[in-house]
Amino acid sequence: MEKKCLDCGRIIRGRTDKKFCSDQCRNNYNNRLNRNTNNYIRNVHGLLRKNRRIIADLYNDGKTRVHKDALFALGYNFSFFTHIIESTGGEIFHYCFEYGYCETEDDFLELKENSRYLDYQ
């Protein structure tokens, strides 16, 4: 019995345990299998990069305190961040890579750059 390629259906020649007729068919097949997972990861990473860019732009423009609505208006998504750090003073900072913010009681955000991550550049 002849084996057929899992991607294109052509007859496979060569080793008995081959599943694909070429590297292109193997890549096509695996890309099709992983498409949904890869799209989800790509979308989340895009949101994280956008959030980082928004905070970085504001921070690098000299702003260390902004209203929460200003970030929201720029497209910041508060559901996506990379990590949370609690300071020794009990303040909770939400970080998106090396840039983060701490919420204050009056709906303002204190922006901060975590210089610890700059050593990896």
Image (cartoon, helix red, strand yellow):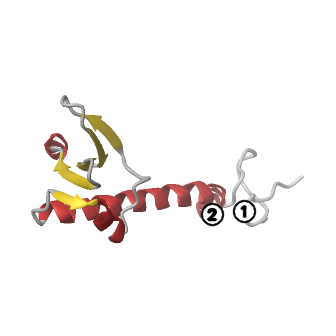
Kindly check if marks 1 and 2 are in contact, taking CB atoms under 8 A apart as contact.
Answer: yes
Mark 1 or mark 2: name the one nearer the start of the chain. Answer: 1
Q: Nearer the viewer, residue 13 or 55?
A: 55
Q: Measured from the top left, where is residue 61 in percent x and y?
A: 12, 66
Give the answer, above or below, for where 65 lies relative to 73.
above
Q: Residue furthest left?
A: 62
Residue 52 place in picture, x, y as percent? 29, 58
Residue depicted at 65% across the width and 61% down the height: 32
Which of the pair 51/103 is nearer the observer? 103
Q: Which residue is mark 2?
A: 28
Label 2 neighbour load within 10 Å: few <14, some 14-19, many 20+: some
Q: Is residue 5 left or right of residue 95?
A: right
Q: Single out the residue that lies furthest toward the top.
A: 88
Q: With 7 as the anchor, is 66 left or right in this view?
A: left
- Work out whether residue 34 or residue 36 is closer to the camera in this orientation and state it: 36
Task: Name the foreground residue: 6 vs 59.
Answer: 59
- Residue at 24% in and 37% down: 91
Does dot 1 land on a helix, a strand or a loop? Answer: loop
Residue 7: image tag: 1
What is the spatial separation of the Cα atoms under label 1 and label 2, in whole angstroms? 7 Å
Q: Residue furthest bottom?
A: 73
Residue type, label 2? Asn
Q: Residue 90, labelled with which disc? A: none
- Amino acid under disc 1: Asp
Callout count: 2
Q: Position of residue 90 (x, y in %)?
A: 24, 31
Which structural element holds mark 2? helix
Residue at the spot 55% in from the left edge and 61% down from the top edge: 39
Q: Residues within 10 Å of mark 1 (few under 14, many from 20)?
A: some
Q: Residue farthest to the front?
A: 106
